[in-house]
Image (spheres, grey):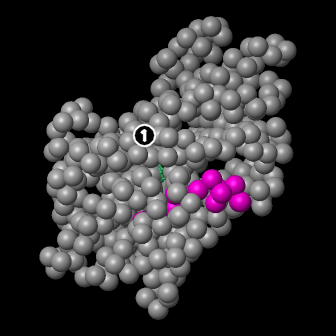
Amino acid sequence: MALSGENVAVSPMKLERMLSMKGGQGDDSYVKNSQAQAQHARSMLHLLEETLDHAQLTPPSDTFAVADLGCSCGSNTLHIIDVIIKHMMKQYENSTYDSTPEFSAYFSDLPSNDFNTLFQLLPPIADSGGSMEECLASDNHREYFAAGVPGSFYRRLFPSNSINVFYSAFSLHWLSQVPDIVLDKKSSAYNKGKIFIHGAKESTINAYRKQFQNDLAGFLRSRAIEMKKGGSMFLVCLGRTSKDPTDQGGAGLLFGTHFQDAWNDLVQEGLISSDQRDSFNIPVYAPSIEDFKEVVDANGSFTINKLELFKGGSPLVVNHPENELEIGQALANSCRSVSGVLVDAHIGEFLSEELFFRVSSRATSQAKELLEKLQFFHIVASLSLA
Ligand SMILES: C[S@@+](CC[C@H](N)C(=O)[O-])C[C@H]1O[C@@H](n2cnc3c(N)ncnc32)[C@H](O)[C@@H]1O
């Protein structure tokens, strides 16, 4: 992990090597700051189950393979894989097949993901001597073989024709790179004064939109090769309600207000130069349904079972909603758990600490408004291999 504060520009290969959610189990880690994602995923379980009902059962002599792309290091992925496999076991039980297959689960993320923390949370494998009823009832065991797959989901990760079900949640809004022209001072798309595209000019936004669509196209091309015939895919990523891409919705509030202001504070206080701020951009794009659909249609390999915008709720999970300090800290922790690794690499850990301290104090002073207004919407896509 690059922590030197060497002001690294985020080319695709560099971003792939360093992007990860904050590892470990500290207060600003992803493990401790992913309850909101867990709640949002829970509220969409009925949509996931509908997608799984579209997945064709392959003969039990074949391994049934499930992959979570962008699994990160928390317990969310373990819970979801458990839900998927238990659902598929029931499908086999209710089918004409007289046995269930063996299941494989692949946990995939970029190489800098904290796979160690994830694997330590992995429950032990169930004793294969148990009955189906025992298997379905057991909470503390897993019914699948597990493996980690490091790599970018914008390229090939698995052998062709090998995966029955793909799942990916809260990940596809992360671009493979900040578009080069956005960081090029000579370009009209240079995002001067900003670290995110919320409220940015049209040429900057267009560069991000194009990057998102190229990335999603690469994702779908790869999955179409890797998926078994009759397979299904459930995708969830940040989305926006507005037709106007300069309004990035919840992502805009998270990265475009207090976080942006805190960067400006560092510049005004002379702790960093304005160039240092402007060469940092968050590689996130919240697409509209139309942005997403255009790419799926152009790819042509998948049938759309469902494509909708789903209200996810707030990314802030707090115990005492009246406690402004707690809300301010929750926003800073939430922001840091997803972007802290990139910030550390750009300005070093010391200044990163200063930055997130300012995010927290700014958010504390606007706590009530934040709690009311910070809402995420998600694009939910259920796709089958056509
Ligand atoms: C917010 S986390 C979501 C984690 C998990 N799916 C959940 O539901 O809690 C986003 C994850 O996407 C991963 N990610 C971002 N870009 C990626 C890429 N190109 N290839 C693979 N994983 C990527 C990040 O490393 C991160 O772990």
Q: Is residue 301 above or below residue 79?
A: below
How far across and how far down the image is residue 232, in percent? 73, 39
Instruction: Name the residue tied to disc 1.
Output: 313
- Tag 1's secondary structure? strand
Residue 225 locus on image (x, y percent): 78, 52
**Up/down of 128 relative to 362, above or below:** above
Viewport quadrant of the C terminus: top right
Q: Is mark 1 within 8 Å of ligand 1?
A: no
Q: Which residues are magenta?
A: 282-295
- Quadrant placement of the N terminus: bottom left
Q: Quadrant of residue 234?
A: top right
Residue 356 falls left or right of residue 54: left
- 327 or 88, nearer to the observer: 327
Give the side of residue 318 with respect to residue 128, left or right.
left
Residue 317 lies in the magenta stretch: no
Residue 47 visible in the snapshot:
yes
Above/below status of 322 relative to 20: above
Q: What crowding class fits label 1: few (fewer than 14 Cα within 10 Å), some (14-19), or many (20 or more)?
A: some
Q: Residue at x 73, y 27 (%)?
A: 53
Q: Check disc 1 and give the amino acid type.
A: Gly
- Tell me which residue sits at (65%, 28%) in the image: 49
Foreground pick, 52 / 370: 370
Vertical order, 148 against 211 (above or below): above
Q: Residue 181, position in %: x, y?
A: 52, 82
Magenta stretch encompasses residue 290:
yes
